[in-house]
Amino acid sequence: MSEMKLGPAARYFDDFEIGEQFLTQGRTISDVELTMWAMFSGDMNPFHIDDVYAKEHSLFGGRFPQGLMAVGIASGLYERMGLFVGTGLAMTGQTITYRKPVLVGDTIYVRLTVAGLRPHPRRPAGTVTFGYEIIDSESTVFVDGEWGILLASRAVNEAAQPIEAPPFEAQPNGARTKNGGSR
């Protein structure tokens, strides 16, 4: 069994505490993301892709991004923090509540708050439930909800046997070879 490769900021289930908060870097939403998300998802609602229609009928004065686009970008923002690189095992669930539309030109951040910790009954792992908020620089909440992720616990790596390299032996010519081997 190979040891899990951890990112420099990776955390195990055991490392989180209720109430702990994390804030991602920001990302400004542009027309490019809106268009690419419409193409990628197939969501070609005229509110997202038709300037004339959206200016006449939109509640927001023009085209606006799809709600799930903001949630998808938020996922990328918290992934970039590296908290789950090598320890994340599975996403266990997510709720989404839209509070205010994210519009082109808005810069969004994600604030994660540890809301729950539940050890797995049979595995060296546990589920961390995060409250999340997609916010702007003034903490206006656009989207919020809960997100659960199953994370490995420290017992995963503590139980693994370290792999030791065979000792090197000095050879008469000054070369070093692995025990019993030749160069």
Image (cartoon, rainbow, N blue to C red):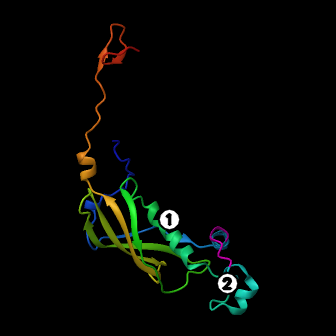
Which kind of residue does numbered mark 2 sit on? Phe
Q: Give the range drawn in magenta.
A: 39-44
Q: Depth check: 97 or 123 in front?
A: 123
What residue is rendered at 44% in x and 68% in y? 24
Image depth: mark 2 or mark 1 in front: 2
Where is 12 relative to 27, above or below?
above
SS assignment at label 2: helix
Name the residue furthest front: 122
Which kind of residue does numbered mark 1 sit on? Gly
Q: In which quarter of the image is the C terminus?
A: top left
Q: What residue would you read off at disc 2?
A: 47
**105 left or right, relative to 110:** right
Where is 60 relative to 128, above or below?
below
Name the residue furthest right: 52
Whether residue 61 is in magenta: the answer is: no
Q: Depth check: 40 or 139 in front?
A: 40
Q: Mark 1 Cα within 10 Å, few/some/many (few <14, many 20+)? A: few
Q: In which quarter of the image is the N terminus?
A: top left
What residue is rendered at 41% in x and 58% in y? 82
Q: Depth check: 107 or 141 in front?
A: 141
| Mark drawn on residue 76 | 1
| Disc 2 from disc 1: Cα separation | 24 Å
